[in-house]
Image (tube, grey):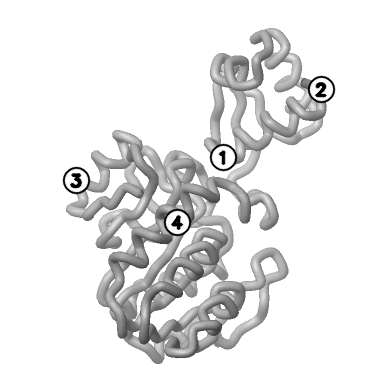
Amino acid sequence: MKPENRHQAILYAVMRHGYVSIESLSEELGVSSQTVRRDISELDRTGMLERRPGGASCRTTTINNTYGNRQVEDIKEKERIGKAIAQYIPDDSSVFITLGTTLEVIAYALLERNGLMVITNNTVAALTLNKKTNFEVVLASGYMRKSSNGLVGESAIEFVNGFQCDYVIMSVGGISEADGHLLDYHTADVSVAQAMMRNANKVLLAVSRAKFGRQAVVRVAPLKETDVLFTGDPVPPRLAELATGAGIEVIAA
């Protein structure tokens, strides 16, 4: 494998997991530990990641992966989660949908349902859901973030506060391994999601397993404020423990 390809693979692994060990990278890439150490040192010098004892981690908790990379990240797992949520939500329900590429995938799965009323600030999900003739899709007002095409701001929050939905389907940038707190990267996104949580009867959290232990700078809510966790199978043991302790139903897809 060429050095530039190894570097890309290492960066992707770090973005996905937050921290990766030299041993695991050596096994994954099929190269020696010494080669991985040299690659990590070079990436550390260029500021792409941070060299840590025994491995490497993200240098910052303030910047998310690029939108294009997030669209393909854990795509099969997201599709399974989407199918599980579509099976969970009954026809003729009202649903908030937050921002995120996971929600864009879930939107396709929800086309299997009938009679949904969807309130969202996710323009990509809205366009998908609007294809269904018996869906009513209501799009929030606000300014559009270039990184996600999502609508945020005070007008978006005020708009959300005008509704009371059966469910909110949401995702986050990371979940703290220490206490299970939900984390994300942008206060504007988080503020709208928090408004949806306050105005929903049931909170459905959809996250791929890679989000567990991933760090981000903005605190969204404690895990206990969600009702059902949809994630990949097998569920990380520590995440299962935190969910059980908070009395949250876990559905592994």
Disc 3 or 2, which lies upstream in sequence? 2
Q: What's the CA distance linking mark 2 and mark 4?
A: 39 Å
Q: CA distance from mark 3 to mark 2?
A: 46 Å
> Mark 3 to mark 1: distance in Å?
26 Å
The residue tagged with tag 2: helix, strand or loop? Answer: loop
Query: What amino acid is at disc 2?
Result: Lys
Amino acid type indicated by mark 3: Gly
Mark positioned earlier in the residue sequence (4 or 1) = 1
Residue 188 is situated, as x and y percent measured from the top left of the image, at: 57, 70
- Choose the circle earlier in sequence order: 3 or 4: 4
Q: At which x and y percent is residue 200?
A: 31, 77
Marks 3 and 2: which is nearer the front?
2
Q: Amino acid at mark 1?
A: Arg
Neighbor class of circle 4 (other Cα within 10 Å; few <14, some 14-19, many 20+) is: some
Q: CA distance from mark 2 to mark 1?
A: 21 Å
Q: Amino acid at mark 4?
A: Arg
The residue pinned by badge 3 equals 245
Badge 2: residue crowd in 10 Å (few <14, some 14–19, many ≥20) = few
Sequence-first tag of 2 and 1: 2
| Residue 108 position (above or below residue 184) | below
Task: Name the residue beneath numbered marker 1.
Answer: 16
Asked which secondary structure carries label 3, the reply is helix
Query: Comparing marks 2 and 4, which lies closer to the viewer?
Result: 2
Q: At 32% from the left edge and 41% from the top edge, which residue is drawn?
A: 239
